[in-house]
Amino acid sequence: MRLRNSSMDGSDGSQLFEDTSRAGSGSQTGYRNQQAGPQAAGFPGQSLLSDPMSNLAMAYGSSLASQGREMVDKNLDRFIPISKLKYYFAVDTVYVGKKLGLLVFPYMHENWEVSYQQDTPVAPRFDVNAPDLYIPAMGFITYVLVAGLALGTQNRFSPELLGVQASSALVWLIMEVLAVLLSLYLVTVNTDLTTIDLLAFSGYKYVGMIVGVVAGLLFGKPAYYLSLLWCCVAIFVFMIRTLRLKLLSEAAAEGRLVRGARNQLRMYLTMSIAAAQPIFMYWLTYHLIR
């Protein structure tokens, strides 16, 4: 009886288990305080973003970025005239069709002058006489593909040989343009022809080269020679009638004696540029047909 009373009396006896209810409630309260602490204190980035100095630094950085972009665009336009290149690629399907017909059949065309609007030549899509870079660029790519096809039909295809075909055609084109520029400088011809114009006119011969190689692949070597001969005569006539207006336009403003001497030089230069086109056309295609 005494033992039972003493065990039931919890005031003077030690407890077998600790009372953790209060401790648990205290830890939960601390956890809630930890969760609410950052929200109550506020995120440090908010004060940084609201700082006037940070806003000023961001505005200064954006202004520096815009100035750097303008500087890059200005220097890029100095070496690569992007605005001028847009003019030479302003073509459409109708222009491309008419221009290809003019390159292959230039005999019936009468008006070869480029149209102007407020002292500025109109875009190529509005005038078939305007030079463009779309046909020369696509002609160069198509020529490389046709050359690869011709080499493949002869079991001579290899990536190295195709690279030689592309690089040789590009190098000869660049050398041709540089030779014309040097000739214009030596003859002292005042003309509105630009380097891009010469590149466009020199690149038109790829159309005749493609026609000759395709005809040779389909119908044999005689068809290659006949079609290439036709295209050579066509590009010769096209270059004579086109460059004559460009190179002889300043002759009328000079004196009679000076005009006669320089007129002959300009005519010889025009004929030399036109005669060089068939030579390059044959040189770059004769080995593709066997």
Image (cartoon, grey):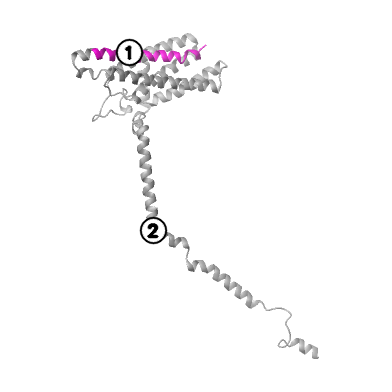
Q: Residue flagged by tag 1: what amino acid is it? A: Met
Instruction: Tell me residue 222's x, y (percent).
Output: 47, 8
Which quarter of the figure is the N terminus placed in? bottom right
Looking at the image, can residue 228 be seen?
yes
Q: How would you rate the neighbour count of disc 1 (Cα within 10 Å): few for under 14, some for 14-19, many for 20 or more?
A: some
Left or right of 21? Residue 166 is left
Helix, strand or loop at label 2? It is: helix
Instruction: Tell me residue 218's x, y (percent).
Output: 50, 14
- 71, 83: nearer the viewer: 71
Q: Is residue 277 part of the magenta span, yes or no?
A: yes
Instruction: Tell me residue 219's x, y (percent).
Output: 49, 12
Q: Residue furthest front?
A: 186
Most frequent secondary structure within the magenta stretch = helix
Which residue is found at the position 46% from the left and 23% from the top?
142
228 relative to 8, above or below = above
Pointer 1: what residue?
Answer: 271
Disc assigned to residue 53: 2
Looking at the image, can residue 112 be seen?
no
Question: Magenta residues, as a range?
Answer: 261-290
Instruction: Tell me residue 247's x, y (percent).
Output: 28, 18
- 49, 18: nearer the viewer: 49
Q: Residue flagged by tag 2: what amino acid is it? A: Met
Which residue is found at the position 38% from the left and 39% from the top?
72
